[in-house]
């Protein structure tokens, strides 16, 4: 059994007439130590998936269905009652380093309190461990940084602190939601190295959320493409990128600089992701797909496509897409 | 160390305001119609008499010279003598000040001890009937005039139920315990409006903070709801809290005049009322000056707490 097993995860927002569905039966599995990329354009439902797993959607407005088992224990029971977050070996790094840290507490105190809650450490022990964590995420002069407030740190540094806080939870699964989107390219490369290194070192699995296939190519073992709240393709990164099976994955891929060079322009997929609540009967991607035929008007299922791959497109085996070698 | 630096900065920035306040206090006084010399000597005084009184009081000096003398004396604690009683104004004020200070402090405690927890609880239960009950209560509370609330409290709790002594009050020097007890109703009358105001401000600041990204981070790392609300969101709400408390202090000092009158307390507010009736300019000036200093001192304290509470303000 995998470390994380998610079955038909559904999320609905709102109540009664105005209720809209954001996730449609998402299945996910991640093995221990594995890095899985979750990709899709903005609005595909990546963050909603992450927050649903973390239990961070507001229960007053969001309804979560399906099952999720982490390390042998369900994250919530049949009645939707969640295991206390402090007991679940899972942590999350968020996209916005500028706002995700508490502005009026020091870096040290935010780390120390995490260790005290998560690992029942005494003050002194927690302090020592906090210093080690800051060092582990590549922060120089950790003793001085402990006393710093978030606004005194650069975006990249804050993201390192966020990672240290996540590590303080001793997660078996780390969810990283676009952790490098808000920082510049050099810092982005450093953070990716860091996350990959930490995952290997600590045997930690990572669900790496990104809209950037380049990042997936560099960082992940397997990848899942999401579109309009559904998984549309999944498989090992090397194979999917070498030969994408879903027109949507192929479209994302042609927007990569490497692919764009060959075509002398940066391709984009026309149109945009339908928001939750959009009425769709056939293939969800059909309105934007240049390979659409009459067969596409029926609901599409996620079907096996070769070894260890799945794709939600009835024409997948008829069409050949150009991929990239990674 | 940081504290002294911060306190020094805040104090320094208050000095120009203080000077301006003394200016206004002094010159406004001179704009009020009516001649103090006439007030002292009576309507039938001879011109020579009036001239002598003016010379005694320094009223024949140029205005600015009068200001300098007055401000200089005030700075050393000499507020002059009362035209009416001939007593030292400093002594008069010192005699009346304690009761007003205790009253306003108690009222401020009432405001904070009720307003703060009510605001936090309402924010936690935002949009429930509990929240709506509190916010509606607070909206009404803000609209209630001090004097009316004071009279209601007297009618119900001292005249009706007899739980508290009636208006008049015990002098502080005679029986401090009894005097404090007698200040409970006035403090409620003065402080409840502030409680409502603080409740509203704290609620909205807390609601805003509880929906921020950093609170989501705290939840993600497994902090208890109690710690998130009472430690993190509350500390992040401390700027609006300090602001509203500062405003309340100014309001309390003004409101004390009315409440002291309703409850027959001889504090500095009632001193001001008496002095106004008797055209005792020196005393009025002194009271206004003290009020200005108190408000300024509050602003300094609020400013210091800003700088200490929020690391982003340097
Ligand atoms: N709390 C919410 N209430 C209603 N709609 C939401 C909420 N959160 C997200 N959505 C919608 O769900 C869709 C998926 O969002 P999200 O998961 O954030 O996308 P992304 O893949 O960019 O992370 C978007 O259309 C978004 O507007
Ligand atoms: S099913 Fe048809 S419309 Fe949908 S992605 Fe495949 S080819 Fe395009
Ligand atoms: Mg997102």
Image: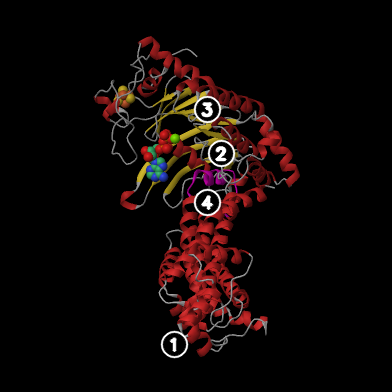
Q: Nearer the viewer, residue A169 or B290?
A: B290
Instruction: Classify mark 3 as within 8 Å of ligand 1 or not, answering yes or no.
Output: no
Residue at numbered disc 2: A151
Q: Mark 2 or mark 3, which is nearer to you?
A: 2
B282, above or below A178, in the image? below
- Within 10 Å of disc 3 (Cα), the crowding (few <14, some 14-19, many 20+) is many
Mark earlier in primary sequence (3, 4): 3
- Give the residue at x 48% y 81%: B48
Whole-number angstrom distance, CA of label 3 to CA of label 4: 27 Å
- Farthest residue, direction left: A294
Which picture quadrant has residue A219? top right
Q: Mark 4 or mark 1, which is nearer to you?
A: 1
Where is residue A326 shown, x and y percent of the image? Answer: 50, 14
Q: Is residue B67 visible?
A: yes
- Farthest residue, direction right: A124
Mark earlier in primary sequence (2, 3): 3
- Give the residue at x 62% y 45%: A87
Tag 4 and tag 1 share a subunit: no
- Quadrant of ligand 2: it is top left
Report the magenta stretch's main SS.
helix
Tag 2 and tag 3 share a subunit: yes
């Amino acid at each position: 059994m995998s470390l994380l097993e998610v079955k038909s995860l559904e999320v609905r927002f709102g109540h009664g007439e105005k209720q809209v569905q954001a996730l449609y039966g998402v299945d996910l599995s991640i093995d221990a130590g594995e890095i899985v990329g979750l990709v899709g354009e903005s609005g595909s439902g990546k963050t909603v998936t992450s927050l649903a797993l973390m239990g961070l959607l507001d229960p007053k407005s969001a309804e979560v269905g399906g099952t999720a088992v982490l390390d042998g224990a369900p994250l919530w029971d049949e009645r939707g009652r969640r295991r206390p977050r402090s007991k679940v070996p899972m942590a999350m790094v968020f996209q916005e380093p500028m706002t995700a840290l508490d502005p009026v507490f020091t870096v040290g105190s935010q780390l120390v309190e995490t260790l005290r809650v998560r690992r029942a450490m005494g003050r002194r022990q927690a302090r020592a461990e906090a210093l080690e964590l800051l060092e582990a995420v590549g922060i120089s002069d950790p003793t001085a940084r402990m006393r710093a407030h978030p606004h005194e740190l650069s975006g990249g540094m804050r993201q390192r602190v966020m990672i240290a806080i996540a590590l303080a939870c001793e997660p078996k699964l780390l969810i990283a939601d676009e952790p490098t989107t808000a920082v510049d390219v050099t810092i982005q490369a450093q953070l990716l190295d860091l996350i990959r290194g930490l995952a290997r070192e600590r045997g930690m699995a990572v669900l790496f959320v990104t809209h950037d296939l380049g990042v997936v190519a560099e960082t992940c073992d397997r990848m899942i493409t999401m579109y309009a709240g559904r998984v549309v393709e999944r498989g090992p990164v090397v194979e999917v990128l070498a030969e994408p099976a879903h027109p949507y994955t192929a479209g994302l891929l042609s927007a990569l600089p490497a692919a764009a060079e060959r075509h002398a322009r940066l391709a984009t997929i026309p149109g945009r992701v339908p928001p939750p609540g959009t009425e769709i009967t056939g293939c969800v991607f059909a309105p934007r797909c240049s390979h659409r035929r009459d067969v596409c008007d029926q609901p599409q299922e996620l079907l096996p496509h070769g070894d260890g791959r799945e794709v939600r497109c009835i024409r997948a085996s008829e069409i050949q897409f150009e991929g990239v070698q990674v | 160390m940081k504290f002294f630096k911060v306190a020094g900065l805040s104090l320094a920035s208050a000095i120009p305001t203080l000077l301006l306040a003394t200016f206004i206090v002094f010159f406004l006084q001179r704009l009020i119609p009516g001649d103090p010399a006439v007030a002292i000597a009576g309507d039938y005084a001879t011109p020579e008499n009036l001239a002598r009184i003016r010379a005694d009081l320094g009223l024949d000096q140029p205005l600015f010279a009068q200001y300098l003398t007055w401000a200089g004396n005030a700075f050393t604690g000499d507020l002059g003598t009362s035209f009416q009683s001939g007593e030292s104004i400093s002594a008069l004020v010192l005699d009346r000040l304690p009761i007003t200070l205790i009253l306003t402090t108690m009222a401020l405690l009432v405001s904070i001890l009720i307003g703060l927890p009510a605001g936090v609880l309402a924010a936690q239960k935002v949009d429930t009937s509990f929240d709506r009950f509190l916010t509606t209560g607070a909206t009404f509370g803000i609209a209630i005039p001090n004097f009316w609330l004071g009279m209601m409290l007297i009618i119900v709790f001292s005249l009706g139920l007899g739980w508290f002594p009636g208006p008049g009050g015990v002098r502080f020097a005679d029986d401090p315990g009894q005097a404090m007890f007698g200040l409970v109703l006035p403090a409620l009358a003065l402080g409840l409006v502030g409680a409502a105001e603080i409740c509203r401000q704290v609620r909205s600041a807390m609601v805003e903070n509880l929906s921020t990204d950093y609170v989501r981070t705290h939840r993600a790392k497994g902090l208890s709801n109690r710690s998130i609300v009472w430690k993190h969101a509350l500390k992040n709400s401390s700027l609006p809290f300090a602001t509203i408390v500062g405003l309340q202090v100014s309001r309390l000092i003004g409101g004390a005049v009315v409440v002291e009158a309703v409850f027959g307390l001889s504090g500095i507010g009632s001193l001001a009322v008496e002095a106004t009736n008797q055209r005792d300019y020196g005393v009025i000036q002194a009271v206004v000056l003290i009020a200005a200093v108190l408000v300024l001192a509050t602003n300094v304290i609020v400013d210091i707490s800003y700088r200490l509470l929020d690391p982003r303000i340097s």
